[in-house]
Image (cartoon, helix red, strand yellow):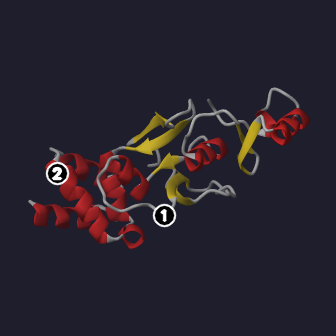
Amino acid sequence: MKALRPKAAAEKRSALYRGHADGRWERIGRGVYLPADAPAMDWDQIEAAARRPEATICLISALAHYDLTDEIPDALSVSIPRGMRAPATEGAIRWHRFDATTFDLGRGQILIQGSSQPIGLYSAERTIVDCFRLRSVVGYEVARDATKEWLGRGGKPAELMSIASLLPRAKAPLLQALEVLA
């Protein structure tokens, strides 16, 4: 089940708004509606995916998805290509802009749990490298601990280094952490 926006509604906008007033549609964000009988799902992810099809879960939110951190994200971290405007949202969403040339590196898609709405998700390797690259945002300790957990699960340092060599400001701090952890 995908979110519905008034522009994309098969029915007229007025019918959608009447359905909302009658309780058939539930407004989860400005201009984003779900059927009232929809199963439980993450509304922040639904809103991000409905507003930007290229929205990709990143940083601490992606680490939490892979169970590589004990941190509880206070907002959903979502990346979009640099140059795109971050949409206004009502949910707890933190928008990040990543370079458009490397945006798709390590990017996959998942279905939002309880819906048929897809959203982008970076691989665990790309997420760890991004956390080192943006360590001033997420904290060096978070990146280091995620790397330690990932290595403990059988991850290969070469996989991290191959991605880090393609992203700016990531290779040196990652190499230092790998030397300490090895």
Residue placed most toward the observer, 158 or 2: 2
From the image, tell me which residue sits under label 2.
151
Q: Residue at x 20, y 54 (%)?
A: 149
Image coords of residue 7 (percent x, y): 80, 37
Q: Quadrant of the C terminus?
A: bottom left
Using the image, determine if residue 125 lies above or below residue 6: below
Q: Determine whether, in the image, residue 140 is placed left or right of residue 10.
A: left
- In the rendered structure, which amino acid carries the disc numbered 1? Asp
Q: Quadrant of the N terminus?
A: top right
Using the image, determine if residue 108 lies above or below residue 141: above
Using the image, determine if residue 168 lies above or below residue 153: below
- In the rendered structure, which amino acid carries the disc numbered 2? Leu
Q: Is residue 21 visible?
A: yes
Q: Earlier in the sequence, mark 1 or mark 2?
A: 1
Residue placed most toward the observer, 3 or 170: 3
State which quadrant residue 3 falls in: top right
Image coords of residue 85 (percent x, y): 66, 56
From the image, tell me which residue sits under label 1.
74
Image coords of residue 46 (percent x, y): 60, 43
Residue at the bottom extreme of this rendering:
136
Image coords of residue 97 (percent x, y): 53, 58
Residue at the top extreme of this rendering:
10
Q: Determine whether, in the image, residue 81 is placed left or right of residue 121.
A: right
**Residue 13 tag number:** none
Q: Residues within 10 Å of mark 1 (few under 14, many from 20)?
A: few
Q: Residue at x 44, y 53 (%)?
A: 58
Q: Residue at x 30, y 70 (%)?
A: 140
